[in-house]
Image (spheres, rainbow, N blue to C red):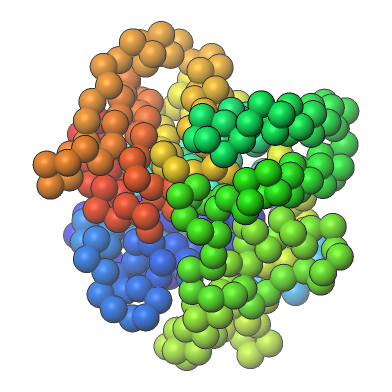
Amino acid sequence: MLRYEADCHTGTANNGGPGASSTGYGNFAEIGPLDVFQRPRNHSWVHFANLLFVDNPVGAGYSYVTNDGAYARNESQIADDLVALLSVFLTKLPEFQVVPLYIFGESYGGKMAAIFALALNKAVSSGQIRCQLRGVVLGDGWLSPIDSTATWGPYLYTMSMLDKGDLLSLHHVVLSIRDALDHRKLVKATQLWTTAEDLVETLTNGVDWYNILAQQSKQFGHGTVSFPKGHVLHRAFERHVAPLYADSLSALMNGPIRDKLSVIPANVSWGGQSTGVFEHLQEDFLLPAVDTVDRLLNETDIRVVVYGGQLDLIVDALGTLQWLDRLSWPGMTGFRGAQKRVLLVDGATAAFYKSYKNLALFWMLKAGHMVPADAPQAAEQMARNVLAGKL
């Protein structure tokens, strides 16, 4: 856990994977005060918010377990761990009990953010924790994996990357994933999902999952952790977690940052247990959290903000719109009819957004899965608007 202070709102940041590190990637590659090369970031969110980066689920980043039984295996265990952490944080730093709190999550972290927000609201309502929870922000969130997966084909087809024969081939694999999920064969479903990714990469000549207009690459070098080749989870981990533990970032986190913190046990390395996180959550990986979003809207007064990058494939806009449209929240009629507005940055269109009561949606232009990395100025303006209630 790393924190930066400012005289304003507090935001907790959770990255995806599962197994990615917020203290590392979210901090140094996206929104923290310095980048991975220790240069000041012009559009750091620390300029307008207190930032609390959390390495979760336990085993991600600097966090660690001493036995396999301590790994989280489902969303409720993740939520319990996060509530326990925040309880300790607010007890030790009670001044933050009265500061408005927003939970931010990206990718699988969006799923974790939703379940964390619901669990935290319950803890606040029961008097277990004192805090001013105001909102949850779900960035390119893995809220309905089957909706995302089922729309890869149509999305890539409209982007001139698939033909109709390719669409049909991918559709058959998606049907097999649906069948496995329907029969609660969750490990098999995750394995079939990896097969779908393999097919997409073959049909598109290696499209980048996180930004379809980018060349598939690792931003800071090659990943330093992974499963052995041949392991059933090797390819999925290589695509979605290992690049976030790339060599230059790993050198920073296991070198200067580790030395500066002076609290990391000698036998613990940053990212050393990330494969364990991924493996223990493989049954949870494709389960949706749409019902959790519905409960947040129906049972709480927490503001729910959803955003996605226009160029993101892994959580494409089509899939996000599908699960949003199925929400049972009575306000959905008003939300559908709400006027779409423009977010301008330096006079140029950076995003479109709409909101109604406690729900808001941002379409972030010229950005992929990691919106703050791809469009830092637009992401900053969006976050400022959210925290200021300008929706």
Residue displayed at 81% across by 42% down: 192
Q: Is residue 202 left or right of residue 343?
A: right
- Along the line of sight, which residue is nearer the eye, 154 or 374? 154
Above-or-below relation of 212 to 60: above
- Along the line of sight, which residue is nearer the eye, 70 or 183? 183
Residue pushed farthest left?
347
Q: Is residue 36 left or right of residue 209?
A: left
Above-or-below relation of 117 to 60: above
Residue 250 location (% of width, % of height): 54, 80
Residue displayed at 74% across by 59% down: 235
Residue 98 location (% of width, % of height): 29, 50
Q: Is residue 242 left or right of residue 7?
A: right
- Along the line of sight, which residue is nearer the eye, 93 or 339? 339
State the quadrant of the C terminus: top left
On the image, which quarter does residue 75 sit in? top right
Question: In this rendering, does residue 112 appear at all?
Answer: no
Residue displayed at 65% across by 82% down: 268
Above-or-below relation of 155 to 331: below
Residue displayed at 26% across by 69% down: 41
- Along the line of sight, which residue is nearer the eye, 297 or 271? 271
Question: In this rendering, does residue 51 appear at all?
Answer: yes
On the image, which quarter does residue 330 sit in? top left
Q: Is residue 206 left or right of residue 375?
A: right
Residue 275 location (% of width, % of height): 73, 66
Task: Say how many tags the image has.
Answer: 0
